[in-house]
Structures are given as C-alpha cells and as structure tokens.
Amino acid sequence: MAWRSQLSRNLKELRVLFCQTSPTSASARSFVEQNYKDLKTLNPKFPILIRECSGIEPQIWARYDMGVEKGVRLEGLTEPQILKALEDLVKAGASLKA
C-alpha cells in the first residue's frame, strides 16, 4: 500500500466526517480507529481532519491544489471499501498534477 505515503504529495488536506453514535457511521469510525495512526506516521505534517457531528452522513473529502475538492459518501461502505475510496482519491490527486 505505497499510496498511503503519497497523501502529502497528492493532496493538500483530508477530512473525515461522521456521527459519533449512529450505526451508519460505524464503519467510518472503525476506519479512523484502525488507520489514522498509520496514515499520520507516514505523513506527519499532512493535515488529516476528523470531524464528528451528531446526525451527519459519513463522508471523506480530499482537497487538492487550486482549491479543488472531491468527496465520497461512506454510508453503507465497509472499512476496506472506505480504504479503497481513499486510495482512489489519492490517485486522482496524482492525475491532477500530471
């Protein structure tokens, strides 16, 4: 998973939004618990923002150069599917630079 270390090269910021208690956000909470430390260790100065808000739909947002943003809704996705969605966002950032 070499793409994990590419976060800081291909993105400007990553935001993860979810509800602290709702069942629809369970996989997003699990994703953060399982992956945040690894992602932050590989990208120590990269801003990974975790936003919790009661009743919000789980989402992940990537901000690229020039203020371009792309978001993915996480409702109904499993943790591996969320990881794949993040990988796709990182790869999209690489293609925007090309």
Image (cartoon, grey):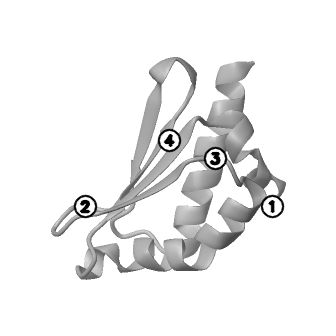
Which dot, 3 or 1, sits closer to the camera? 3
On the rendered image, what quadrant is the N terminus found in?
Answer: bottom right
Q: The residue tagged with tag 2: helix, strand or loop?
A: loop
* Disc 1 residue type (three-letter): Met
Q: The residue tagged with tag 4: helix, strand or loop?
A: strand
Give yes or no for contact between labels 1 and 4 (Cβ–Cβ under 8 Å). Answer: no
Q: The residue tagged with tag 3: helix, strand or loop?
A: loop
Apparent side of residue 20 relative to residue 36 in the rendered image (left or right): left
Picture layout, residue 40 above or below residue 63 = below
Q: Would you call the spot at circle 3 few (<14 residues within 10 Å), some (14-19), or many (20 or more)?
A: some
Which residue is located at x 39 percent, y 61 percent?
Answer: 74
Q: CA distance from mark 1 to mark 4?
A: 18 Å
Which residue is located at x 74 percent, y 64 percent?
Answer: 41
Q: Residue 90 placed where, x, y %?
A: 65, 43
Q: Which mark is residue 57?
A: 2
* Disc 4 residue type (three-letter): Ala
Apparent side of residue 70 relative to residue 10 in the rendered image (left or right): left
Which dot, 1 or 4, sits closer to the camera? 4
Q: Residue 7 placed where, x, y %?
A: 68, 46
* Disc 2 residue type (three-letter): Glu
Identify the residue position indicated by label 1 in the image.
1
Which dot, 2 or 3, sits closer to the camera? 3
Apparent side of residue 41 relative to residue 59 in the rendered image (left or right): right
Which callout, 1 or 4, points at the residue further toward the start of the chain? 1
* Disc 3 residue type (three-letter): Phe
Q: CA distance from mark 3 to mark 1?
A: 18 Å
Identify the residue position indicated by label 4 in the image.
62
Picture layout, residue 47 above or below residue 10 = below
Q: Would you call the spot at circle 2 few (<14 residues within 10 Å), some (14-19), or many (20 or more)?
A: some
On the rendered image, what quadrant is the C terminus found in?
Answer: top right
